[in-house]
Image (spheres, rainbow, N blue to C red):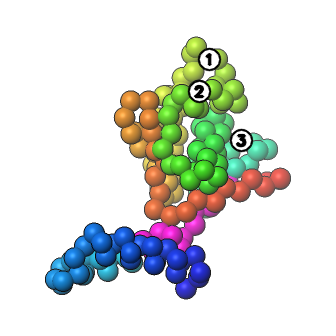
Amino acid sequence: MSKHARAATKNFLCFALTEIDGANEAAQAELDELHARYVAAVSQTLRVVYFASDGSIQVGERHVCRGTSAALLRECVRIAQQEGRMEFSFREFKRIPELISHPKNTGFETRLNRLRAALTAAASGLAIEPRGRGQFALVTDCRLELVEPEHR
């Protein structure tokens, strides 16, 4: 087990033991199952590859989309990787000129829905879910790695 996985396991166990009383077998079984899922999640990495040459993006080994939707996903993964944030607001993306061509008619919701549909169709282990008015989240059960190769 790697150093990162051991640290994650220790942190998880400290949290879980305060939340679940280990006195009965049902709670212990639930704790064991949660522990196994947590270790699997922190030890797996989902690779997201953005190809600038044609503006396409690949999640895992599956091509997802290209164009503005790909640039939007790239920005979400970049923020998640650098800042550790998985929840976003429409407003922060509407301010990025590379994603939005006209400030008054952004079409952002349409672009986000196309990206959500492309991720669902690709069954890549990555999803976008609404989180309230003007909010959405990038959802996955593992760590993300953004790769931007020079040439395809």
Kindly identify which residue carries mark 2.
94
Position of 128 with respect to 57 (left or right) is left
Which residue type does callout 1 highlight?
Answer: Pro
- For the point 76% across and 44% down, the residue is 52
Mark 2 belongs to which amino acid? Lys
Q: In the image, what residue type sits under mark 3? A: Gly
Q: Is residue 144 magenta?
A: no
Left or right side of 150 for 20: left
Say what secondary structure mark 3 lies in: loop
Distance between mark 1 and mark 3 Cα atoms: 22 Å
Residue named by callout 1: 103
Single out the mark in the foreground, 1 or 3.
Answer: 1
| Residue at 38%, 75% in the rendered image | 14
Identify the residue at horizontal 48%, vertical 44% (top origin): 87
* Residue 75: image location, x then y, percent: 63, 42
Disc 3: CA contacts within 10 A as few (<14), some (14-19) or many (>=20): some
Circles 1 and 2, Cβ within 8 Å, touching? The answer is yes
